[in-house]
Image: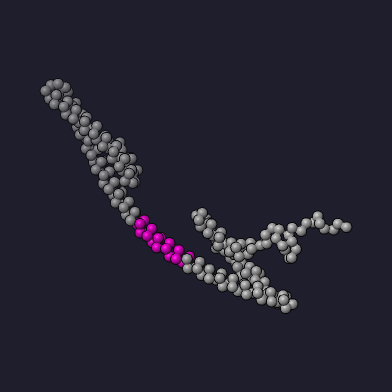
Amino acid sequence: MTPSPHTEALGKARTAADFAAVIALLDSDLKNAAARKLELEKAKGRAMFGRGDLAAARIALSEANAVVALLEKTREAANKRRAAAQSEACVDIAALADEIRANAASLDERWRMAQWLIEQLRQQLFDADALRRAVATANSQFDAAGVANLKINPTAIRRAAVTGGRATAPARLSAAAIQADRLLLSLLSPGGALDPRPALGAPVGGIAGRYSLRGRGRG
């Protein structure tokens, strides 16, 4: 028996959509084969009354019946495999749903931890600022008392304290996460929010930054 013309396509099909496409082709072929079988049955009937070659009509009808039977068998197999593919896809979706629910729970946990850490960071910053202001006040008193050697440099303390390793950002990071990461790093970086530098043209060491070299050394 000649193989179905769609046997190869059926063998390559993997998803329910693939099987549905093959079944559509089989339905079309089956419709055409059934129409040919009907015509051959009529030709055989006419041949039985002497209007045609009866032996040839019987052979042609037998071949048509075989084609119809093969197409029907192939279609039945395709339907079974499509049902299996649909069932497997449902299992995959269910597994994916379970995985996503677990990821959502982990995401909630991460954000709660992030919120807690940020609040802890804020409290530490509040405490550090209060201590920095106390040190600044003491430094002023040391200056007034003429014991500048007792002064403490809070900026040097902060810079030394925040020097250390940095977590490596993943290769794939959303724009929002990149922006948040840069904001957090700016708290530790020189020139950042906690390490202001004098603005261009501002007084430096009691001398105006706008002091012009052109006003020096004449005469």
Quadrant (top left/top right/bottom left/bottom right) for the N terminus: top left
Of the pair 27 and 214, the residue shown nearer to us:
214
Q: Main secondary structure of the magenta part?
A: helix
Task: Determine whether 9 is above or below 129 in the image.
Answer: above
Residue lying at 17% horizontally and 25% vertically, measured from the top left: 43
Identify the residue at horizontal 32%, vertical 54% (top origin): 91
Q: Residue at x 11, y 23 (%)?
A: 49
Residue 129 seen in the figure: yes
Instruction: Please check the rendered image and state whether residue 170 is part of the magenta-colored stretch, yes or no.
Output: no
* Corner quadrant of residue 219: bottom right
Q: Is residue 100 magenta?
A: yes
In this rendering, position of residue 105 left or right of residue 27: right
Between residue 6 and residue 93, name the one nearer to us.
93
Rendered residue at 67%/59% (across/down): 199
Is residue 56 shown above or below 29? above
Determine the residue located farthest toward the left in the rendered image: 49
Q: Extreme top residue here?
A: 51
**Numbered range of the magenta stretch:** 95-114
**Relative to 71, residue 128 above or below:** below
